[in-house]
Amino acid sequence: MILQLSYISTARPTLILADVENILAASRRRNQADAITGLLVFDGKRFLQVLEGDEAKVEKTYQRIAADERHRAIVRLSERRIATAEFGHWAMASHIVGPVLGDGNVVAQVDAMTADLPDANLRETLRGFARVRGG
């Protein structure tokens, strides 16, 4: 079984785009080494992330993320065991979308990225975040 964990957090006001790019680069490198897949949505103020993989590795990754001072108010939203990685078909460990990167409509992007998710609750959590944050 695979652990799938999701959380939300708030970026520190001092966070800049270069910090987000560094987070993504480190995430890709570490997640690839640990066979962790997932989705990272950042809207300029908040992070919403789903991590999935070996339980011990996901927990270790989450603990490292929780200790990162570039964000605060981290809240674990869900945790479940799944048979197959739901984000495993993506070559990238994570995706960042949103106005902060100037790449268009957050809602449409998150809708497209989550269209094939089998878990309706997770899909709607991600889409709800995009609608509230990216409106």
Image (tube, rainbow, N blue to C red):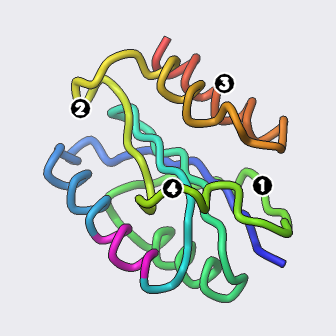
| Cβ atoms under marks 4 and 1 closer than 8 Å | no
20 or 76: nearer the viewer = 20
> Horizontal placement of 111 versus 54: left or right?
left
* Disc on the earlier residue, 4 or 1: 1
What residue does disc 4 label? 90
Taking 9 as reference, is 23 above or below it?
below
**Badge 4 element:** loop
Amino acid type, residue under disc 1 in the picture: Ser
What residue does disc 3 label? 128
* Disc on the earlier residue, 4 or 2: 4
* Disc on the earlier residue, 1 or 2: 1
Q: How many marks?
A: 4
Q: Residue at x 57, y 84 (%)?
A: 60
What residue does disc 2 label? 101
**Picture quadrant where residue 87 is located:** bottom right
Q: Which residues are magenta?
A: 26-32
